[in-house]
Amino acid sequence: MAWLIELALVALLVGGGWTLFARGKRTDERESLTLRRVDAYIETIRRERSNRALVSMSDSELRDLLHMGARNLRIAGERKAWTLLGVAGVGTFAAIVAATQDGIRGFAIAAVVAAVVIYGLNEFLTRQMRAPLEKQGIDIERIKVE
């Protein structure tokens, strides 16, 4: 059982290191895709004219608003991912401690509680990061780059 935990920790460290190593190239590609999506969304806003506040903005204002919104959404998504990873680590540690005290039953209970907490926190943080853009009437799916 302990070797499995060690293997998981090594995999997390290797995966995290690879992610940080490949970050620059991926960031440039994501930035260019974001700018293309923002430009396409500006054309859609101009064509549909459904949101008066967005239609009344100039192209540069709208581009800045949408680009910063997409950037803030990406940053909030990264922050959410790290937060959930930390909570998952704490939940795993708590499950291991519970397993040493109460065996499989304690591990299962702690793991289920951690999963429920992670799910609830994920939903809360997702709604929190989408709220500012939705309040302005921006369709998040049009500027979101995954």
Image: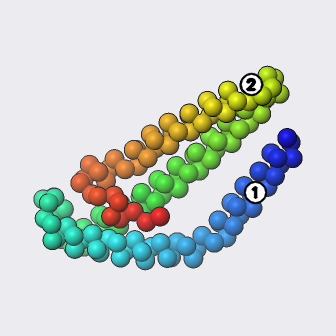
Q: Quadrant of residue 93?
A: top right
Q: Is residue 131 above or below residue 145?
A: above
Q: Is residue 83 above or below residue 140?
A: above
Name the residue tied to disc 2: 105
Please tell me how crowded label 1 is: few (under 14), some (14-19), or many (20+) other residues with Cα within 10 Å. few
In percent of the image, x 24 and y 53: which residue is there?
136
- Image position, residue 109 (x, y; %): 67, 26
Name the residue tied to disc 1: 11
Give the left or right position of residue 15, taking residue 101 as reference: left
How many numbered markers are drawn?
2
- Image position, residue 85 (x, y; %): 62, 47
Q: Quadrant of residue 115?
A: top right
Q: Secondary structure at mark 1?
A: helix
In percent of the image, x 13 and y 65: which residue is there?
49
Give the left or right position of residue 4, taking residue 129 as reference: right
User: Can I make out residue 61 in this image?
Assistant: no
Please tell me how crowded label 2 is: few (under 14), some (14-19), or many (20+) other residues with Cα within 10 Å. few
Give the left or right position of residue 127, taking residue 135 as reference: right
User: Can I make out residue 134 in this image?
Assistant: yes
Q: CA distance from mark 1 to mark 2?
A: 26 Å
Give the left or right position of residue 37, taking residue 2 as reference: left
Q: Is residue 30 above or below residue 88?
A: below
Q: Quadrant of residue 144?
A: bottom left
Amino acid type, mark 1: Ala
In percent of the image, x 28 and y 74: which residue is there?
40
- Image position, residue 98 (x, y; %): 76, 27
- Image position, residue 112 (x, y; %): 63, 31
Mark closer to the chain start, 1 or 2: 1
- Which numbered mark, 1 or 2, is in the foreground of this view? 2
In percent of the image, x 82 and y 47: which residue is there?
4
Q: Secondary structure at mark 2?
A: helix
